[in-house]
Each structure stands twice: as C-alpha cells, then as structure tokens.
Amino acid sequence: MNNPNMYEAARQARAAAVEMAVLEGEQKNRALQSIITVLRENESAIFDANRKDLLRAEESGIDAPILKRLVFDRKKLDGVIEGIQVLVNLDEPVGKLQLATELDEGLELYRISCPIGVIGMIFESRPDALVQISTLCLKSGNSVLLKGGREALETNRILASCIADGASREKLPPGWIYNLESREEVNQMLSMDREIDLLVPRGSNEFVRYIMDNSRIPVMGHADGICHTYIHASADPGTAVRVAVDGKTQYVAVCNATETILIDRSMVKIILPVLVSALQEAGVRVKACPVCRELIPELEEAGEEDWSTEYLDLVISIKAVKNLEEAVEHINRYGSGHTDAIIATDEDASKYFTNRVDSANVFVNCSTRFSDGFRYGFGAEVGISTGKLHARGPVGLEGLLTYKYKLIGNGQIVADYTSGKKRFTHRRLDIS
C-alpha cells in the first residue's frame, strides 16, 4: 500500500471496531451529546471553512445543484444537531435479542444484533452527510472511513475534527473515525477488503458502478434518484398539484426530488394547466410529452432521455399515460428504484401501485421528499439504498447492523445426534 497513513488509519479503524462493538449505550449517547457541544463551540470556524469552500467552488464554475448541496449554514448545523439528538433518544441497537431457540435441553441458540465493523463511506458534496454518517456509525458501534467531495474539503475537515474531539472526550477508542482527503486514498480504500467490511458510495450511477467494479468489498449502492409522482384518474386536483409541486420544488438538488410527473390522460385537461402554472411560478422549466404539448404548445419537448434523467435542478418532465398499468410500467422501466408516489382517492389503485412499483419507497398522497432517514425517525441516514440485499430505502441504524449466533451448551457433541442417541427439540423460546 503506497500511503502509510492510509494503511495505519485502516488498521486503527479495524482495532477500534472491536472496542466500538462492546461500548455501553450510555457511553455512546454521552459521546453524541459531547459532539453536539463541540459543534456548537466551533460553529464560527465551521461557517468560515464552508465559506472558503463555497468561494473556491464558485470560482471554479461548479454546477449550481452541487453548489447548493455544499452550503453548511446555521440551518444545516441546527438540522444535523437535531438529528444527533434523535439518535440519542433512540433505543440502543446493539446486543438486541432477535431469536432464541432451544435445540435441545441445555443447548440454546441466540441471534444477537451487532455492528458490521468498518464502514467505508464515499459521498458527494454535502458536508451535513459527514455528520449524519459518522454519528450513525457511532450509535451503531461501527468504525468509519469517510471520503467527501473535494469541493467540501475545508468543511469536512473541521466537521470530522469536531466529531473526533467530541467522541474522545467520552473516551471512545482512537481511530474509529478517519477523514480521507485524496483520490489516491479512495483507490487504496477499494483494495482493503481485509480491513473494510462495507462500502457505501453516494453519487451517480457511473460512480457507484465504478466502485462496484473495482473492489471486492461488498457495496451498498445509492445511485440516481429518478423519482416519479403519478396523478391517478381518481386524484383530488388540489392535492395532486400541491404534492407534485412540493416533490419538485421544496429542495431540487436532492435524490428524492420528483423528476417526472405522470398524469392519467383523463385528468390532463383538468390538472395540466394548473400544475404547469404552479411549477412555472416556482421557476421550474417544464418539458412535456406530445399529448401535453397539444394542450400547452409552448412547453418544451421531452425526449426519450428525459424519462431517465435526474435533473437535480428546476427542470421537470411531464408525461400523460393511458392508465394505472402504463404508469407502473413506465416507472419500473425508467425509474431508479428510489421513491415513487401516487396521488389517488381510489384505494384499490393505490394498493395496485404500491404492490407493483419496484422501488425502495412507495408513497400514497404525499410528497416524494418524505423519503429521508430523519423524516422516517431514524435520526439520519447514510444514504438511500436502491438495492434489495441487506438494507433498502433510507439506511439508518438497522442498515449498519448485522447479527451473530451464540450457541450455549454444556458439553453436547454432534455425534450423539447423528447416531440417534439424542434428538433436537427445536423449541422456539420467548424473547419478549
């Protein structure tokens, strides 16, 4: 390994993970409260660092959506602190008894929740993600190696320092958190399959695919958020417009923002003029299919590529669909498996939609922007997993845990059971 600092960081993270796994919940909660204190003590320095990052990003001509994600102001600080406080108030996740079975008298099997170990997290320009990820790892008893976007270098550096300082005040093991700053370190991290147990990349499809193709470490992928809001024939028009506009405009530079609105053809004449007016009033460029452009010719034409585009900007595509079945087919074809919503008063239609749309989050009569670990009550999230194995949707504490089996006996041997001398009882024990 070319970088001895990186090797040492990974070694320390592995050693720290052993100690993190057995920390008492009270000690972890005190550490989280201490982190809140340190963040408050250093808020001026944090804001100064963020201003440096923003100035450098503006001078380099960085895209507006990324620039918006880069901001870490008082509102963002208050938000991450609120998330940490939610984590403090959550039950201790480690050491939970999930299953208990008597294999035979005096031979009992237990399944216990435990941390994954060392998490490698590679994320985009949002500095608040660093706070969310690291505090989730702390609460779940994991070590974490963090690599944020180069554009957030100064902000990430001071935030990671504050978190390490706060945790050290409560004597958490040194090395449980490490902030990577170079691309070289990322490539080295991908080769550390003996030190790192799980990689969580947050970025474009191409970026996540690169990580998957260049590492033997298991990857929990979070790629594009091509989210849909479908307005069914039974939708209340006022609800439909309000929810769809919020899904697009409440905050555009995020993966759970609505990128495509589908409208049942029977509702186009009723909904489209009001919807387009509301979107345009909010500054949104509207691109539309031929059916919609027949009604409002001045709308931009939506091409095939628009249906699979994550704009992350004040742009949206609108398509008229024949029915519920076509809406579901469109979403499953072009969506990214992130978050999709139906606006409907017909309960059968809503059930059909939520059962058949193949996404991690399926909503009825509410904005796609609710797809978020904090809003789900998880405290925060390390990302939204669009895969189907281990964890799916907003990944909070449970997504950073695995389990182990503990078998407690008093001298039993397998030969007694294979010979027929003894028989298994396999009696499920009460864990309530």
Image (cartoon, rainbow, N blue to C red):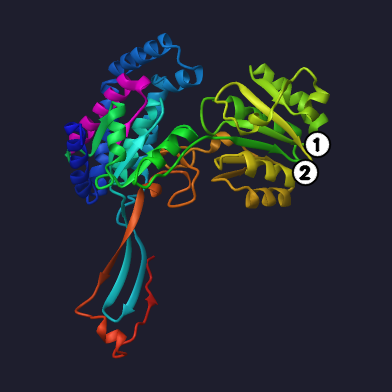
- Quadrant showing the N terminus: top left
User: How far apart in space, not on screen, are marks 2 and 1 (Cα)?
Assistant: 7 Å
Amino acid type for the residue under numbered disc 2: Asn
Whether the residues at callouts 2 and 1 have beta carbons within 8 Å, the answer is: yes
Q: Residue at x 27, y 21 (%)?
A: 42
Q: Which residues are magenta?
A: 145-170
Q: Quadrant of residue 178?
A: top left
The image shows residue 82 at horizontal and vertical percentages of 39, 32
The quarter of the picture where residue 83 lies is top left
Name the residue that disc number 1 marks: 265
Q: Is residue 162 magenta?
A: yes
Where in the figure is residue 288, as x and y percent of width and height? 72, 26
Tag 1: amino acid: Arg
Q: In this rendered view, identify the residue nearer to me: 277 or 1.
A: 1
Residue 270 shows in the view = no
Q: In screen coordinates, is 247 left or right of 201?
A: right
Disc 2 crowd, CA 10 A, few/some/many (<14, 14-19, 20+)? some
